[in-house]
Amino acid sequence: MNDLCAIGFDPVFNVHDFAFFADESVPREPLEERFTLRQDVLDSAGAGLLGPIKRALAKRWLRGKEVTEIVQMISQHRPKDVLKEQEKISRSDAIALIAPNYYMHFPAILKGWITRVFTYGFAYTLTADGWRGAVKGRISLLKRKKARIIQPTFFSEEDFEATGLREAMQKTIDMWGFEYPGIPDVQHVYFHRMYGVDENTRKGYLQRAYQLGKEF
């Protein structure tokens, strides 16, 4: 079990997270033309009283360095909190997520967890066509057997179906978020109208959630 709030996971993607793109599989062209590797090293040198000194040392280190050398250095400074979460996934056969529905997606902390943890080189890589923008150029790496998603929602099941909300979430969350990275079996379960149903219905939701967990 992994309670993101309890462990204080930071969902904000920042400049340090780009270190995961410092991967040997990235073609040299995008590394040189689309990523500001040298500037990233300087920006990550830090602020405060020692910031100018650190940036001066970083600037001196960068002199004459090849792109491959910079990539190797940056890759050694990948965020430790993300690496820890990736290690948890690597030890698992499947992934189960339980979270309320916020704006037809996950709460910010879980959305940020996926954004930061399902990184290049861990959840996927890209072919040359992929770097040119082709979806077919995405190579799946997250080879887990299955994913189960349970989400309480505010709206009724009828509205979910009639307005296309279920289809939209199926594409953005189930398909793109989990199937594309390499999880073939994705089941997304909704508990509708959480604030508008009676107590017996809520108890039924809990019983179903228990059964889903038992079968999982």
Image (spheres, helix red, strand yellow):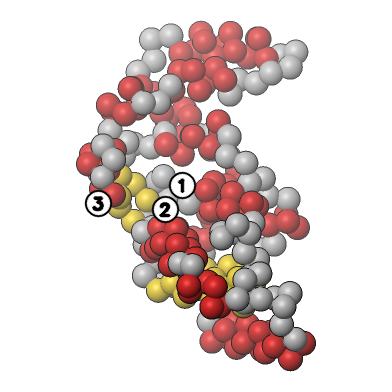
Q: Quote the CA–CA distance across marks 2 and 3.
A: 15 Å
Between residues 82 and 179, which one lies in front from this camera angle?
179
Residue drawn at the location 69% of the way across and 62% of the way down: 3
Could you say whether the residue bearing mark 2 is in a helix, strand or loop? loop
Residue 68 appears left or right of 36: left
* Mark 1, other Cα within 10 Å: few <14 / some 14–19 / many ≥20: many
Query: Residue 131: x and y, percent?
Result: 29, 38
Q: Which residue is mark 3?
A: 136
- Mark 3 Cα shell of 10 Å, populated few (<14), some (14-19), many (≥20): few
Asked if residue 203 shows in the view, the reply is no
Tell me which amino acid carries mark 3. Lys
Ranked by sequence position, the earlier of labels 2 and 3 is 2
Q: Position of residue 178 (x, y in %)?
A: 43, 62
Q: With respect to residue 186, does 32 lie above or below?
A: above
Residue 165, visible in the rendered structure = yes
- Between 60 and 32, which is closer to the camera in this rendering? 32
Residue plotted at (54% across, 73% down)? 159
Horizontal placement of 110 versus 89: left or right?
right
Q: How many marks?
A: 3
Asked if the residue at tag 1 contacts the one at tag 2, i.e. Cβ–Cβ closer than 8 Å, the answer is yes
Q: Position of residue 198 (x, y in %)?
A: 75, 86
Horizontal side of residue 111 vs 47, given as left or right: left
> In the picture shown, does residue 203 fall above or below 40?
below
Number of other residues with Cα within 10 Å of mark 2, as a class: few under 14, some 14 to 19, many 20 or more: some
Side of 74 where 26 appears, left or right: left
The residue drawn where x is 54% and y is 87% is: 215
CB atoms of marks 3 and 1 within 8 Å: no
Q: Which residue is mark 1?
A: 119
Q: Amino acid at mark 2?
A: Ala
Residue placed under numbered mark 2 in the picture: 123
Establish if 38 lies above or below 78: above
